[in-house]
């Protein structure tokens, strides 16, 4: 039963990530792209290759922006550092690890997880290996560090805190997963005062980073329905901290704003997603599992707008770029929506395959790692401003 469940959960996430076979007979095919009059122009600043990308696997790969450098990894174990301004490759390391989650960069440390259940730390200066630690199963959440501890979640529901200097295990929390889960795990949020993590049980929990004691827990979604598929409520979106509010969301559940200190629910809206969230100003942006893009008031949860013109195009998590919110789809297109009303402003195709990973932005430049391994930096400007 467990093997069957794991196989099915991989299929489910593949379906939602743009790897599925589409059928016009049962209405599961992505909608055609709509025509619109562009109000902005997208420029490619630079392009580069970053290995083989996901190589067709359902893994969590994303670029990491740290200072003037951008870091990436592929499933074959190659890790890259680029100059974020011009895309020049600064170094490449061939680790030979089957990387399934990465990459993150903080406090001089690069972190990634492997299909063999290891968390590996490299120097972000030159890619030299600092340490590696074996966990109990495959790592599909991008490990994070605050400089003192490194935190990762394995597929069997184990949360580990490791010494960031040497990888020594400090504490562990066990959250046994349901029979059927999505193939993935939420990226932990690690601060000096708390480790905040979402689990496949539909809960978000906060832990004391020093000893692993539970500070608070909050249920984001309650399993409902008769079948195991209907009862899936994974929290795979990374908790997002803005000021003293944590934003989180689950599959087949809700999107919520929580008090950072107590986990008290500030507001709740029904939602279903397994993608990361984005916040800019007073608005939270979310890509639903059916590829409807939604904008919520961060203070009340009121829906400001929805864009349902990209249904079943298997959108990744949104990212904000200036006055626009950007999503990528299964066919290599980036869609730029006005933050004010969700209307299309521009569209740019950067690849012939899927864009499923989380994108990063420094405010004026968007960095996108396509599943093929193509790495692109883009900027956008209003056509009216240009005139």
Image (cartoon, helix red, strand yellow):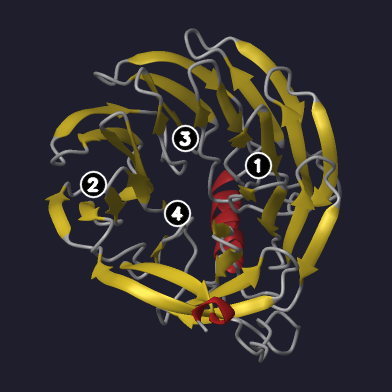
Determine whether the residue tagged by mark 1 lies in a helix, strand or loop.
loop
Q: Nearer the viewer, mark 2 or mark 1?
A: 1
Which label's residue is closer to the chain start, 3 or 2? 2
Indicate which disc, 3 or 4, sits on the residue closer to the N terminus.
3
The label nearer to you, 3 versus 4, is 4
Mark number for residue 360?
Answer: 4
**Disc nearer the start of the sequence (1/4):** 1
Using the image as rendered, state which of residue 115 and residue 311 is in the foreground.
311
Are circles 3 and 4 on residues that touch, CB within 8 Å?
Answer: no
Sequence-first tag of 2 and 1: 2
Q: Nearer the viewer, mark 2 or mark 4?
A: 4
- Circle 4 packing at 10 Å, graded few (<14), some (14-19), many (20+), is many
Q: Quadrant of residue 137?
A: top left
Q: Quadrant of residue 48?
A: bottom left
Q: Real-space Cα distance between discs 3 and 2?
A: 16 Å
Q: Which mark is residue 150?
A: none
Q: Is residue 305 above or below residue 360?
A: below
Mark 2 highlights which residue?
A: 97
Instruction: Determine the CA span between mark 3 and mark 4.
Output: 24 Å
Lower sequence index among marks 1 and 3:
3
Q: Residue at x 84, y 50 (%)?
A: 270
Label 3 crowd (10 A; few <14 / some 14-19 / many >=20): many
**Residue 235: assigned label:** 1
Which x, y percent locates residue 281? 66, 47
**Which residue is tagged 3?**
154
Foreground residue among 329 and 342: 342
* Among numbered discs 2 and 4, the one appearing first in the sequence: 2
**C-alpha span from label 1 to label 4:** 21 Å
Q: Position of residue 117 (x, y in %)?
A: 36, 36
């Amino acid at each position: 039963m467990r093997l069957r469940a794991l196989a099915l959960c991989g299929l489910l996430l593949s379906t939602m990530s743009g790897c599925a076979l589409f059928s016009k007979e049962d209405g599961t095919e992505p909608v055609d792209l709509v025509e619109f009059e562009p109000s902005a122009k997208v420029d490619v600043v630079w392009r580069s290759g970053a290995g083989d990308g996901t190589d067709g696997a359902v893994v969590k790969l994303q670029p990491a922006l740290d200072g003037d450098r951008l870091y990436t990894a592929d499933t074959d174990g190659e890790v890259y550092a680029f100059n974020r301004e011009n895309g020049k490759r600064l170094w490449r390391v061939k680790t030979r690890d089957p990387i399934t989650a990465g990459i993150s960069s903080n406090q001089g440390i690069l972190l990634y997880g492997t299909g063999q259940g290891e968390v590996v730390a490299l120097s972000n200066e030159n890619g030299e290996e600092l340490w590696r630690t074996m966990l109990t199963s495959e790592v599909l959440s991008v490990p994070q560090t605050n400089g003192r501890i490194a935190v990762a979640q394995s597929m069997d529901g184990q949360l580990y805190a490791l010494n960031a200097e040497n990888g020594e295990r400090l504490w562990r929390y066990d959250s046994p997963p349901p029979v059927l889960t999505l193939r993935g795990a939420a990226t932990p949020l690690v601060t000096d005062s708390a480790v905040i993590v979402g689990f496949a049980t539909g809960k978000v929990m906060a832990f004391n980073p020093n000893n692993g004691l539970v500070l608070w827990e909050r249920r984001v979604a309650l399993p409902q329905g008769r079948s195991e598929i209907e009862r899936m409520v994974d929290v795979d979106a990374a908790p997002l901290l803005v000021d003293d509010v944590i934003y989180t969301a689950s599959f087949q559940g809700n999107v919520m704003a929580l008090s950072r200190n107590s986990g008290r629910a500030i507001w709740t809206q029904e939602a279903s997603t397994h993608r990361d969230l984005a916040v800019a100003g007073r608005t939270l942006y979310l890509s639903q599992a059916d590829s409807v893009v939604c904008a919520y008031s961060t203070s009340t949860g009121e829906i400001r707008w929805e864009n349902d013109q990209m249904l079943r195009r298997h959108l990744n998590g949104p990212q904000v770029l200036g006055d626009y919110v950007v999503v990528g789809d299964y066919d290599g297109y980036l869609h730029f929506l006005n933050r004010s009303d969700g209307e299309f402003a521009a569209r740019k195709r950067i690849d012939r395959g899927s864009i499923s990973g989380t994108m990063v932005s420094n405010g004026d430049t968007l960095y996108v790692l396509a599943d093929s391994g193509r790495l692109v930096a883009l900027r956008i400007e209003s056509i009216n401003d240009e005139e």
